[in-house]
Image (cartoon, rainbow, N blue to C red):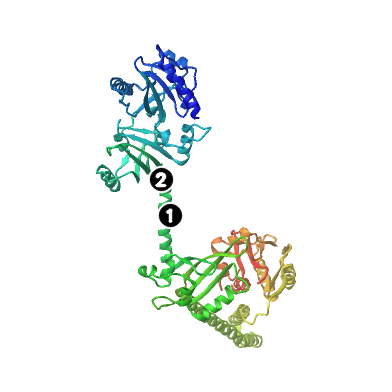
Amino acid sequence: MLDSFLTEFTEIRDELGKEGEHSFFGKNFSFFSAEPILFYNNEKDVIVYANNLFSNEFNFTVEDLADWKYSIYPLINKEDQTPFREAMKVLMAGNGDAIFPDATYRLVNKGKKYSYYRLKVRKLSKSYYYIQLENSLKSAIPVLKNRTADELMNNAEAILKFGFWLWDFQTGKIYWTKGMYRLLEYDTDEVMETSITPDFYASHILKSDAYLDFENRFKNGKVKDSYRNKFQLKTNKGNLVTVFEHANIEYDEQGQIVRITGLTRDITTQEESMKSLADYKAMMLENETFLNYGTWESDGEGKNIYWSEGMFNIFGYDDEEKGQIKVTKELYIQHMNTDDYLRGIESNIGEDTVKDNYLWDYEIKDNKGVIKIISTYGKVIRNNDEAIEKIIGTTRDVTELRSYERTLENKIAELNHSNRELEEFAYVASHDLQEPLRKISTFSQRLQLKFANKLGDDGNLYISRVVAACENMRKLIDNLLEFSRISLNNPPPQRVDLSIVVANAMEDLDFTIAETNAEITVGQLPSVEAISSQMQQLFANMLNNSIKFRKQDTPLQIKIESKKLTLPEKELYNLPPDKHFFLITVEDNGIGFEQQYADKIFQLFQRLEGKSEYPGTGIGLSICKKIVINHKGLIFANAISGNGVTFSIILPKNL
């Protein structure tokens, strides 16, 4: 490399030592290949050499230069030509020690676009000068082989949302890369023709108190060498962006600022994410406080445990005490009831096996001495070797909840006891009423037989009404007894084929079915776990209800079908998704009813029709509902007045 330099330098020196005009076009001095280079005759304003990098970067050929008569000024922006000419005059008029000041000029390429270049001018011989064109912004950016700095910088700026800038204190101008124009939402092609001044840039800055403080420190010389700053900009389109600026300050020998180069990055998205994260943390803290729970994370051995704010609150530690404690397994043991701890270790985290998930209720005494019951859910995270990496979980103070549960359980127990007593009373009372009622009916009938001639027509009518009333009362008592028996001394459930149950119910009602010419169609019915006698009573009551409320002028048709409920249907009826359920429908073409009374018909003693036309006690469907509920099922009806009714019965496959 040194040999090449000496050879080229000797060639240039020998040529310039000759008399006459000189030209080096057609040559390619390899030593001058790092930047675009010109040899320039200042006296005659003639370019006598341009290296290949000049041609590549500016797209000018030797023929293009010839069209300008090799003048350098068409290459320089009009506004910068005068400062360049004055500097060259000073250089020409001075002695051999005169130096061309390094300065930045706008140089125009063949596409009429300009970029900022720092011109380094050194004397070669007499009026011939060596001019190195150094791109002001590219010099601050590493250049990779096989790609131009412009392409690399533009791609990086677009992807990472940043821009480079240079503030030249000598010219009072700020030079932007395309990333800065993009960041401030300017059309690059239009704005590149406009000089960027500090005032122009400052007009986009929203000067908060923090920024004004920085600006004041900068003006007073308290910002040295470099700085970092975060502030907001208002773009050309009126949008607000948050940016982070990092800049380096360069000084001359007298300590005066020469230039500042910097990078400005759009961090709006990050700031919004941080704000969202802060809002989320605040919301979680509110939730933890309101719901009285906390979250935690522990290593496998319990030596290092992280607590959220809610955990400190549950264990009774205030803000001052939080920083004075280290959360470990030992801290838990210190607060826990010993029996609860040993029982929990044995059932949840034993030596032989460690559950991947566990739920643990235990008692603690918090830092203030308050006894609490807390519930902890833990999830074990394992690595690829199945070793425990960490355990995460939530802990909730359930002291009040457990107190409410105990109170509710006591109330339910009292209510169940009361219900059993009432059912037993109803059973006993109904049973004891049978004997006096039988005597009233018997003696009334004997009275009528023996003294019918003496009673007269009115007397016989009254006796008949007493006997009829006794019969109705007997039926009512029988139904009440049936209603009470459903919850008393039930036999254990067993697998029951509902097809057989319905067939037996139809056999019991065969006379009534034949008398009314009812047509009953029975589809395939499932087998369920149930009490057989209650299932037979259920379907007998359903059939009886359809027969009773038939149309007088229309043959009665009853259809019984079933199907297995799908998961969406189980969700619709709020049923457990992991259990199997069957829907059995009993559909008839009877008189129906208004849908608004669909709930009322299942209540005790509720009737929608008159006794004289449709006799009965109003208990039949109530018995049906109680049987279905006793089997953990559902029953409901859909009807249209005058167009029949469909009763839907949902029963679980297994109780």
| Label 1: how many Cα within 10 Å (few below 14, some 14–19, many 20+) | few
Q: Amino acid at mark 1?
A: Leu
Q: Is residue 132 left or right of residue 647?
A: left
Q: Which residue is mark 1?
A: 277
Q: Dividing the picture into quarters, in which one does residue 99 lie?
A: top left
Cα–Cα span, label 2 and label 1: 14 Å
Between residue 368 and residue 202, name the one nearer to us.
Answer: 202
Sequence-first disc among 2 and 1: 2
Q: Is residue 369 left or right of residue 463?
A: left
Q: Residue furthest left?
A: 220
Between residue 182 and residue 310, name the one nearer to us.
Answer: 182
Residue found at x 57% / y 85%: 429
Can you give x and y, in whole percent of width and height, for residue 455 in the image?
60, 85
Can you give x and y, in whole percent of width and height, for residue 432 in the image?
60, 87
Between residue 48 and residue 337, name the one nearer to us.
Answer: 48
Can you give x and y, in whole percent of width and height, for residue 119 in the image?
37, 27
| Label 2: how many Cα within 10 Å (few below 14, some 14–19, many 20+) | some
Residue found at x 50% / y 69%: 303
Q: Which residue is mark 2?
A: 268
Is residue 428 positioned above or below 290 on the image?
below
- Quadrant for the C terminus, please: bottom right
Q: Dividing the picture into quarters, in which one does residue 82 lie?
A: top left
